[in-house]
Amino acid sequence: MPLSRILYVEDDADVRKVATFALKMVGKFTVEACASGEEALEKAVAFAPQLLLLDVMMPGMDGPTTLARLRELPEIADVPAVFMTAKVQPQEVSRYRELGSLDVISKPFDPMTLAASVRGIWERRNG
């Protein structure tokens, strides 16, 4: 099944705006952008995402905590996740995968290739 619906969680308003624009305009995805983990928890079930795209470092509820909380919602428990972060050392990437992330997208990212990166991760998972 092709990827179309992404729940995107990013606390930085400028980064959120650029990434959301890139995912919608370049990738043609339907995106629900959230400024916090708490907002993601409020919107996730109604939005019914196919993929969770989560910033790692956020004030309050960070990306890994947000993912753990989303996994507690039966409707979202099996939705695959991808983390976005500037911390992409091999041991960090390994930890993110242990937490349930399919992959990690490095920040800063290229807005023109973000959608292709996300789609590539999705296609590797779904064959």
Image: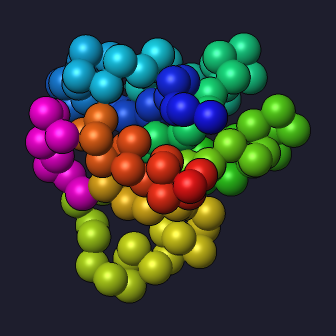
- When the figure is inspected, residue 96 is found, relative to residue 3, above or below; the finding is below
Could you say which quadrant of the image residue 98 lies in? bottom right
Left or right of residue 93: residue 22: left
Could you say which quadrant of the image residue 70 lies in? top right
Give the quadrant of the C terminus: bottom right
Q: Name which residue lies at 53% across and 70% down.
A: 97
- Frontmost residue, 57 versus 29: 29
Magenta stretch: includes residue 80: no
Residue 64 placement (x, y as % from top left): 55, 56
Q: Name which residue lies at 37% across and 44% down.
A: 118
Residue 30 placement (x, y as % from top left): 46, 16
Q: Name which residue lies at 14% across and 49% down.
A: 108
Residue 15 visible in the shown view: yes
Q: Name which residue lies at 39% across and 42% down.
A: 119
Left or right of residue 97: residue 87: left
Residue 20 placement (x, y as % from top left): 31, 22
Left or right of residue 71: residue 15: left
Left or right of residue 63: residue 24: left
Residue 16 visible in the shown view: no
**Which stretch appears magenta?**
106-113
Magenta stretch: includes residue 112: yes
- When the figure is inspected, residue 101 is found, relative to residue 19, above or below; the finding is below
